[in-house]
Amino acid sequence: METMEKVAITIVVVVMVSWGWKLLNWVWLKPKRLEKWLRDEGYNGNSYRLLIGDMIELATMMKEGKSKPIPVTHDITSYALPFDHHIFSKYGEKSFVWLGPKPTMYIKDPELIKHVLLRPDEFQKPYPEPVQDSLIGGLLVTEGHKWIKHRKIINPAFNLQNLKIMFSAISSSCSDMIHKWELIMAEAGSIEVNVWPYIDSLAGDVISRTAFGTYYKEAEKKFEIQKEQTDLIFQMPFILHVPGGRLVPTQANKKLKENFKELRSILMTIINKRKKAIEMGESKHDDLLGILLESNKKEIEENGVGMSMEDVIEECKLFYIVGSETTSNLIVWTMVCLSLHKEWQIRAREEIFQVFGDKELDFEGLKSLKILTMILNEVLRLYPPVIMMTRATHKNTKLGNMMIPPGVQLSLSMMHVHHDREIWGDDVNEFKPERFAEGIVNATKGKGSSPFFPFSYGPRVCIGQNLAMTEAKTAIAMVLQRFSFKLSPSYKHSPFPGFTLPPQFGAHLILSNIS
C-alpha cells in the first residue's frame, strides 16, 4: 500500500513538473528565445512583458485614436494604425510587437510579402487567431487539404456566368437605395445625407440576395447579429489576445457565445430548407448557397467526402463579413473621394452617360467603364478594406535571407505598402486615379503588381473580388447617373479599423439631383 502511494505521489509530481515546465516555456522561456532571435536579426521592439506583452499599450492607443476624427487627408496610416506607427517611429522599419506571449514582426517589403502569400502552406494563418476565430471561419481560416477541397467546391459560385446572373439582384438592391434617397430629396434639390448606413445596408442586402436568394429576408437577422459580433470583438482586443481571455466571464464574452449559438441556429434552418427545396426540385441553383450546396453534393457523389453542415455554416458566415463589409467600405470611400475631387466625379459621370446614357446599366457595359475602374483602384490603394494580414511560422521557414523559427507571427502591412513613397512616388498620399491608366503593373514606378494587393495575393487571393468590384461599379455608376455630391460641413474624417476600414463617424454628404 505504501509503495502504491509513493508511485501515485511520484506520478503527480512528474505531471505537475511537466505541466509547470510547459507553462514556464510558454509564458517566458520561448518568448525570450524568440526575442533574442529577432534582435540578432536586426529587429527591434519593446522587451517582452509576462503574458500581456504590448497589449495594454496597444489597447490604450486604439481607444485614444478612435475617440476623435482627423483633418481630411488621404495620409491616414498613422491614424488607422496608431500603435504600429508609434512602434515604427520608435524602433524603425525592422520592428516587432508582442501580442500576448507571441512576437509579431512587421514585413513591409512587397517582395517578401509576395513570397509569404505565394507559400500558404509554409506561412499559415495564426491559430488560434483571437479576433478572426470569434467572428468567422470558412475559406479565410481553413488550411491545407481542407482549404483546397473547400475552394474547389465554392469556386463555381463565383464564376463569370454566375456573376451575370447575380447582376440583376445587385441592380435591384442599388435601385432600392437610390429610391430611398430620391424620397428624402422629394421636396428639395439638395440635402445632407449620412450615406454610410444606406451603403452598409445596401451591401448587406446585396449579399443577402446573391447568397441566399429567396431566403434573403430570413438572413437579415443573421447580419444584424454578425455586425454586433464585430462590434463586441473590437471592444475588447486586450482580453482576446491574452491567453484564456475568451474564458473570462465578461458580459461581452457571454454575449458573443449567445450570438454564436443564435447565428448557427438561423443558418442551419436556412440551409436545411434550401437542401430540402433542392431535393424536391423546387429551387434554382442561381445564388451562392444554392450553387455551393449543388457543388458540394457533386463532390460527395464523386469523391465520397465534401463539406459538413458546420463547414457550410462557416462559409455562409464568411459570405457576409467578406462579401458585405469589404464592398461597403469600397463604395463609401469612393463617394468620399469623389466628393473631395469633383473633377474625377465629373469625368466618371461623363463616361457613364457615354456608355449607358440615362438608361439602366447592363453587366457587359461595366467592362467599358475604364475611368471608374481607375478610380476604384485608387480608392483601394488609399483605403484598403483590410489594412493588415497576419501569418505565422509552424516550423523553421526561410524568408529572404532569414530562417524564421516556429512561433513567430508576421504582420503584412498592406496599408503601409499602399502608402509607400518609394513605390508610388512623392504623390503617394494624393488621390490620382491616372496612375492606374496603364494598368496596375505600370502604376508602381517599375515595382510590378506585387505592391498592390487589396484582395490579397497568390493562391489565396479573395475568391469574391470580382463580385465586389461588380457591386461597387454598379452602385457608383447608378448613383452618378442620378446625383452629384460633395462633403457636408458636418463630415468627420475617421477611417478607423474594425474588421475592415469603415468611416466610424459616418459619411455626411450633400446630395443634389442631376438636373
Image (tube, rainbow, N blue to C red):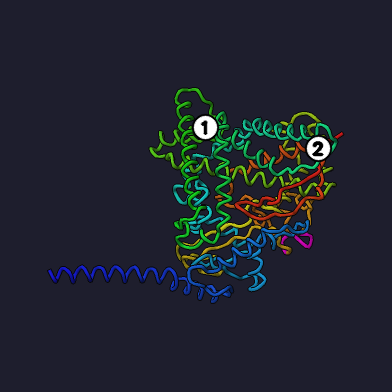
Q: Is residue 445 visible?
A: no
Residue shown at 79% from the left, 47% from the top: 338
Q: Is residue 300 above or below residue 55?
A: above
Q: Residue 426 magenta-drawn?
A: yes
Q: Position of residue 325 (x, y in %)?
A: 62, 45
Q: Which residue sits at x=57%, y=32%?
A: 216
**Quadrant (top left, top right, bottom left, bottom right) of the N terminus:** bottom left
Q: Position of residue 79 (x, y in %)?
A: 69, 61
Task: Read off the residue under disc 2.
Answer: 483
Residue ID for mark 1: 290
The residues bearing labels 1 and 2 have C-alpha atoms spaced at a distance of 36 Å
Q: Is residue 21 above or below residue 483?
A: below
List x then y, in percent, for residue 278. Answer: 48, 27
Residue 45 in view in this figure: yes
Which of the two labelled residues, at mark 1 and mark 2, occupies the earlier sequence position?
1
Residue plotted at (57% across, 40% down)? 223
Residue type pointed to by label 2? Phe
Question: Which residues lie in the magenta part?
Answer: 422-428
Element on which disc 1 rests: helix
